[in-house]
Amino acid sequence: MAYRELSKVLSEIGLDIAGKYNCYSLDYQTMKENEYVINFQGEEDRDRYKDNWTKDDNGYFFAVHQTLQGCTVQYPLAEVFSQVCDANAPVQVFYTRNGIVEMQIYDLFTFHQTDEPLVLKSFDEVADTVAYAIYLYARVPFMERWQMYQVIRLGRQKWIGIQIFKIFAAAFLYTATVLVSGVLIMVPHLEWTADWGRLYHTLALTNLQDEIDLDFFASYRLINDYKPARLMLISALVLFLVVSFIGLIMLLISLCFSRAASVITATSLAIAEIAIENAGRRMQQIMVYIIPTEWIKIAKAGTKNVMGVLSPDFDEIIIRLFIMVLILMVLIYLVGSRVSYNFYGEE
């Protein structure tokens, strides 16, 4: 009876739920034990708890999904509904002996085929950070002809150490510039507080960031899990290590092969985001753990995307980056002490 009434109501709005729903039997004692109410700020609100639970509250919970070509359709709303599961189904209904007590419907879609071509994001929009890092290390492997005299005077090992230091120094200056410039631009509009602020809460808790086409993702999870100062330091460390990694990989490839090969390698990291977004689930599971440029997106750390692929959390990211940087440094020292140096004139 519950299914028939629900099916009739939803069919009136054009939604056929046959084979696309899950139903759970809920008794009032279980619901009483697990009741938990939060307010808009995400804090427990005991004033809104139900006063009395009885057998009349026994009912059925229906979670209804849309499907297209055999695939479940769901739109991730920020990170509140980031995973495809019954708890986040677009149609949720609670049915008791009194009929439909509550029904929540959001993000239902209509579908149609089109011959319009798919337009990908521009390269600049996809890979700004990596593109800047490539430009930052455009002189790698620092083989201008005048460097030849430094190699003779200092020795290979010490000269390589200086080049590695240059890479770290450039990464530090780049990271500091990104952080400081981001603050300076917003100075006239800043509210000087140690909290996240009302604007970020609004962006993270609503779909406003989609409506205004925000360039970054405002994460609700990060608001709850991190203080602003701590997250800024973590973000700066991740950015510093990723940019350092790009510089070191370019130095290693240029020593082994050529400057052109190093630029191609770095460019492939820049477009890796497109490859990850369009890869299959199994390939995504591998790529999110081995491509450092993907880790710059701090809002994705430790979360699952719509395909259920879990990205590494901050601890894993930082440990992996430190290990990768150390391995690159060792390889640069080993390769740099054995290969022949090809110095070039000023360009």
Image (cartoon, helix red, strand yellow):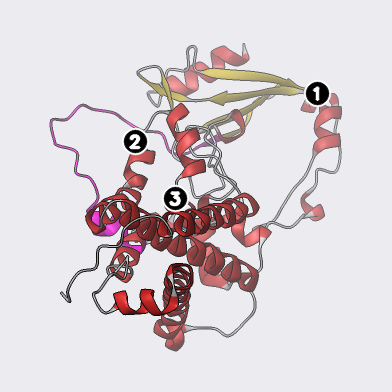
- Tell me the distance, in whole angstroms, between the alpha carbons under discs 1 and 2: 43 Å
Q: Label 3: how many residues lie within 10 Å, few (<14), some (14-19) or many (20+)?
A: many
Relative placement, left or right, of 301 versus 33 is left
Of marks 2 and 3, the one in the foreground? 3
Asked which secondary structure carries label 1, the reply is loop
The residue lying at 62 percent from left, 15 percent from top is 2
Q: Amino acid at mark 2?
A: Asn
Q: Is residue 41 visible?
A: no
- Quarter holding the N terminus? top right
List the residue tagged with mark 1. Answer: 27
Q: Amino acid at mark 3?
A: Glu
**Sequence-earlier tag: 3 or 1:** 1
- Tell me the distance, in whole angstroms, between the alpha carbons under discs 2 and 3: 14 Å
Q: Is residue 123 magenta?
A: yes
Residue 67, how many percent across, how many down?
41, 22
**Sequence-earlier tag: 2 or 3:** 2
Numbered badge on residue 294? 3
Relative placement, left or right, of 197 versus 119 is right
Range drawn in magenta: 104-129
Q: Amino acid at mark 1?
A: Asp
Q: Is residue 13 magenta?
A: no
The residue lying at 78 percent from left, 28 percent from top is 57
Of marks 1 and 2, the one in the foreground? 2
Secondary structure predominantly adopted by residues drawn in magenta: loop
Camera-side residue of 107 and 176? 176
**Sequence-earlier tag: 1 or 2:** 1
List the residue tagged with mark 2. Answer: 278
Of marks 3 and 1, the one in the foreground? 3
